[in-house]
Amino acid sequence: MGVCLMNRWLFITFICALTNLNEALSPDGEALVRFRSGVSISDGVISKWRPEDPDPCNWKGVTCDSKTKRVIALSLAHHKLRGPLPPELGQLDQLRLLLLHNNALYGSIPAALGNCTALEGIYLQNNYLTGLIPSEMGNLSALKDLDISNNNLNGAIPVSLGQLEKLQCLKQFSEGKIPSDSLLTAFQRTRNFIGNLNLCGKQIDVVCKDDRGNSSTGSTAGQGGKTVKLLISASATVGGLLLVALMGFWGCFLYKKLGRVESKSLAIDVSGGASIVMFHGDLPYASKDIIKKLEALNEEHIIGCGGFGTVYKLDMEDGNVFALKKIVKLNEGFDRFFERELEILGSIKHRYLVNLRGYCNSPTSKLLLYDYLPGGSLDEALHERGEQLDWDSRVNIIIGAAKGLAYLHHDCSPRIIHRDIKSSNILLDGNLEARVSDFGLAKLLEDEESHITTIVAGTFGYLAPEYMQSGRATEKTDVYSFGVLVLEVLSGKLPTDTSFIEKGYNVVGWLNFLISENRAREIVDRSCQGVETESLDALLSIATKCVSSSPDERPTMHRVVQLLESEVMTPCPSEFYDSSSD
């Protein structure tokens, strides 16, 4: 009898062991649990991850492949994560997107991340990471976008990154020599180089010490030999809280494989069941004609890139030109939600908004078709092309951007919060009239439950203080960004220009300092011709209201347009200054 009981007990134990084995958390889940255990502070999202689950696919911020249940995306931006990046992330070898920006992560980037060879996008910007960029990241052969800007990283760009043939966008802070014996030599000179610590190389016309046997100029392009301090105090306060942030320049290395016979095109993105959806019936193109044109696009046609995707220039046979924005899809449910939102965006037409013409729905990505604007971006006009915008042009651009944003906030249905107002999202036509672009895209790529954008949640320098704290956007966070934009247009300087940073300010803090000294007019670009003092005073008054640290004190965009039309277009004597200040 005792033997029977013993056998039954052993049998039950065996069955329970099998059951526990079947219900054990997957290796990807175990890696994420170790990631969670290393984070000391968060907003509670990752504390809801259940280790007793068989896989992590229903966990907040985690996206899995529907068939294999392997983790393909980890999206935890703006969740107040504090702690080091664990090497266990390297076990997620099917990971395609890693989005941990705008947190308080510190320590070094783990070399084990080089094991995640399926990675296409890494977004670690706006943290406190230190040390070198690991050379193992050169193993990420599928990598297209790498953003590690606004950290405390140092050291040279690893030569191994030059092996990444698909790399199109690189945003970083670094020092030392840009590798000259790799594919990085084909990167075009852009302002992303400006502000990097002691960066040198042929691409920016700065001679390195090793190349000439003595000390290098020690400068970066256009910086006059000045070293940039990355850690600065943000001027804005919320309830007396001093925000400390790492400020820096965002830019884009547009990768073009010059001199190569073979060039990867978009054919793979539009093959195998791609379809074209047009929102307006005034384009005389058949779907097959558009797809044929898309297949021929390659790196040589890239005109921009950023958090929302890569932008190509599309020339049609009849002479019409369009801008094509490529956005990578995350999961299967992405299609239904994306198409519903695109139908809404396609119905929105306004003089001061970039017109969305349609999209190509492909198995791997969404390709959005916009009107092409020959004037490029306001960012390029102010900081890259070297052209001088006169006073009337600057005022017209500000007013056009304000009207476009006011339409999104107050008049279109549904109302839209832009979330990423900045000079690179203000495009110019041939007459330098402004058009607001990328509206609605942040919502398309957000987490529906938390309403936090997964790819782009604003750009450093333009972010309202309360947005930096919570990651939650409102109309008033757009108003703050617009105020920064006005100051950028008036000053001709980036919001985090080194001339501000070295004094412990961004452009908002610099304005507040000048106001306290009764010298606010000194913020205006000295190269700007035809400045009208009364209009300048009115613009500074409006901008000051927009960048108030208190959202309640900021005007609506409808009110901003009213002020622009009444006080800037038809200026009257301003009360912005005391009469004795002149």
Image (tube, rainbow, N blue to C red):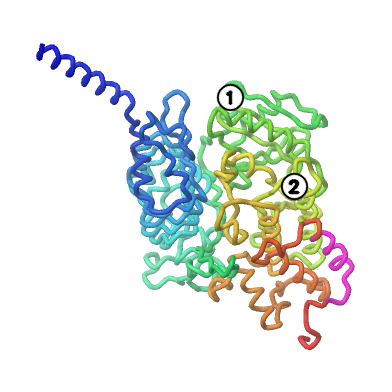
The image quadrant where one finds the C terminus is bottom right
Q: Residue furthest front?
A: 1
Relative image position of residue 236 (x, y in whole percent): 60, 68
As helix, strand or loop, the secondary structure at mark 1 comes to loop
**In the figure, residue 572 lies in which quadrant?**
bottom right
Relative image position of residue 523 (x, y in whole percent): 69, 74
Mark 2 closeness class: few <14, some 14–19, many ≥20 residues within 10 Å: some
* Magenta stretch bounds: 560-574
Q: Is residue 413 above or below residue 467?
A: above
**In the figure, residue 323 lies in which quadrant?**
top right
In the displayed structure, does residue 68 sit left or right of residue 512?
A: left
Dominant secondary structure (helix, strand or loop) of the stretch shown in magenta: helix
Q: Residue furthest bottom?
A: 580
In the displayed structure, does residue 412 sit left or right of residue 173?
A: right
Identify the amino acid type marked 2: Leu
Residue 302 bears which disc, if any? none
Relative image position of residue 499 (x, y in whole percent): 58, 73
Residue 380 shows in the view: no
Relative image position of residue 477 (x, y in whole percent): 66, 56
Residue 373 bears which disc, if any? 2
Q: Residue at x 80, y 41 (%)?
A: 349
Q: Is residue 507 magenta?
A: no
Q: Residue at x 81, y 45 (%)?
A: 350
Residue 250 shows in the view: yes
Q: Residue at x 80, y 71 (%)?
A: 538
In the displayed structure, does residue 261 sit left or right of residue 118?
A: right
Residue 271 bears which disc, if any? 1
